[in-house]
């Protein structure tokens, strides 16, 4: 089962990200991980949150446009070459990485969020390489 990532489409104007995070905070939704990419006019604010469906509902009520997307979470030990081990396994499986972002999930491990052209194949390749895939409940509660 994949992790649900919340992607919010945000206009590039002062305070808009604050409005989104405030709406989530007021609804007791924890933000576990974030990534922001932008163009001249808008940004895509990607989040892993404690309750993706409720977060999307809250944001819709506040006038934000958002989507839920399936992504894969991978636990990577803090050792040299672990990110390469993951990307190599995915590449050998013939899967394209669309984007990737990471966060520290403890002293011994990091967590990497990936979106690919084929999440099922990517997940199988990562597991075959001996890496641990995060289940949704673990990811939402990091």
Image (cartoon, rainbow, N blue to C red):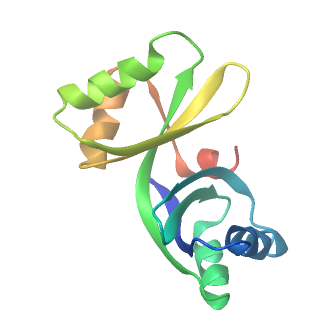
Residue 101 left/right relative to 49? left
Instruction: Identify whether 128 is placed above or below 116.
Output: above
Task: Say which residue appears at 64% left-offset and 80% top-offset.
Answer: 59
Position of residue 61 measured from the top left corner of the image (x, y, whole percent): 65, 90
92 vs 8, nearest the viewer: 8
Task: Say which residue appears at 21% left-offset and 39% top-offset.
Answer: 95
Task: Say which residue appears at 45% left-offset and 63% top-offset.
Answer: 39
Quarter occupied by the C terminus: top right
Residue extending farthest left: 94
Position of residue 91 measured from the top left corner of the image (x, y, whole percent): 23, 29
Position of residue 1 measured from the top left corner of the image (x, y, whole percent): 42, 52
Task: Say which residue appears at 44% left-offset and 41% top-offset.
Answer: 100
Residue extending farthest front: 40
Residue 22 left/right relative to 74? right
Does residue 30 appear in this view?
yes
Instruction: Identify whether 88 is placed above or below 22.
Output: above
Does residue 130 appear in this view?
no
Instruction: Identify whether 19 is placed above or below 112.
Output: below
Residue 3 left/right relative to 99? right
Q: How many labels does the image show?
A: 0
97 vs 141, nearest the viewer: 97
Position of residue 111 measured from the top left corner of the image (x, y, whole percent): 57, 34
Instruction: Identify whether 56 is placed above or below 61.
Output: above
């Amino acid at each position: 089962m994949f992790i649900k990532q919340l992607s919010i489409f945000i206009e590039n104007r002062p305070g808009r990200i604050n409005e989104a995070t405030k709406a989530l905070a007021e609804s007791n939704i924890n933000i576990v991980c974030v990534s922001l990419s932008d163009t001249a006019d808008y940004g895509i604010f990607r989040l892993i949150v404690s309750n993706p469906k409720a977060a999307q509902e809250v944001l819709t009520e506040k006038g934000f446009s958002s989507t839920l997307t399936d992504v894969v979470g991978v636990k990577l030990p803090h050792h040299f070459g672990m990110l390469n081990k993951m990307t190599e396994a995915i590449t050998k499986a013939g899967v394209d990485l669309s984007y990737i972002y990471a966060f520290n999930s403890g002293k011994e491990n990091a967590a990497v969020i990936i979106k690919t052209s084929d999440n099922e194949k990517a997940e199988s390749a990562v597991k075959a390489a001996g890496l641990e895939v995060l289940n949704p409940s673990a990811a939402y509660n990091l």
